[in-house]
């Protein structure tokens, strides 16, 4: 598929209902592994006994861990356009960590394509993202995420 065909295909998805990922478990092992990799071992993430004494009532996932799950969530929700050779995270226009994710909670992403444009050799897509926490009214995070998509020439 050419980049122009991919653009036309994706433009039809702008404003359509969100793509929804499968659920991901944010268990203590995942939180601890993230703490080790990032060296962010604040007790609210890694010490269940101490975290139980906070308003959170237990350990919570790092906000940046939740944010880092967007790629896996998007991959589980979306079908990539034919001919795509690579997708690159270009950044965010907005990120808000709305609610903490308790250890053991399940989260999933909802992705709504708000725009797609062609820029010479690639497409730039902008998506509204909401990460919901199972059985919670408020989301974990909301963001506007920008990706660049490259296609075989």
Image: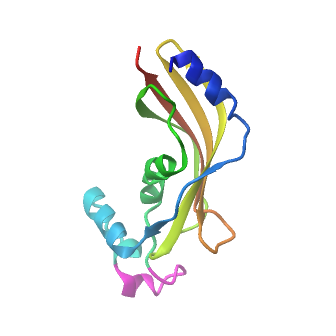
Q: Position of residue 65 (x, y in %)?
A: 42, 58
105 vs 75: above or below: below
Residue 55: in magenta span: yes
Q: Quadrant of residue 103?
A: bottom left
Q: Position of residue 129 (x, y in %)?
A: 60, 48
36 relative to 137 in the view: left or right: left
What is the quadrant of the C terminus in the image? top left
The structure residue drawn at horizontal position 31% and vertical position 69%, both measured from the top left corner, is 32
Dominant secondary structure of the magenta stretch?
loop
Q: Position of residue 12 (x, y in %)?
A: 70, 30
The structure residue drawn at horizontal position 54% and vertical position 49%, both measured from the top left corner, is 77
Total number of numbered labels? 0
Q: Nearer the viewer, residue 25 or 141?
A: 25
The structure residue drawn at horizontal position 66% and vertical position 30%, both measured from the top left corner, is 115
Q: Is residue 101 among the parts visible in the rendering? A: no
Residue range of the region highlighted in magenta in the rendering: 47-58
90 vs 106: above or below: above
Q: Is residue 20 among the parts visible in the rendering? A: yes
56 vs 91: above or below: below
The structure residue drawn at horizontal position 46% and vertical position 82%, both measured from the top left corner, is 58
Q: Nearer the viewer, residue 60 or 127?
A: 127
Residue 62: in magenta span: no
Q: Nearer the viewer, residue 63 or 112?
A: 112
């Amino acid at each position: 598929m050419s980049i122009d065909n991919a653009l036309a295909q994706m433009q039809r998805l702008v404003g359509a209902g969100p793509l929804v990922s499968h659920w991901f478990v944010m268990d203590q092992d995942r939180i601890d592994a993230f703490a080790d990799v990032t060296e962010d071992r604040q007790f609210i993430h890694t010490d269940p006994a101490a975290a139980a004494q906070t308003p959170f009532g237990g350990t919570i996932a790092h906000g940046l861990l939740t944010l880092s799950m967007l790629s896996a969530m998007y991959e589980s929700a979306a079908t990539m356009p034919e001919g795509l050779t690579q997708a690159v995270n270009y950044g965010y226009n907005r990120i808000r960590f709305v609610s903490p994710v308790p250890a053991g909670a399940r989260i999933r992403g909802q992705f709504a394509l708000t725009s797609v444009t062609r820029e010479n050799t690639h497409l730039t897509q902008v998506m509204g993202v909401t990460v919901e926490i199972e059985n919670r009214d408020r989301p974990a995070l909301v963001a506007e995420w920008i990706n660049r998509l490259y296609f075989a020439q």
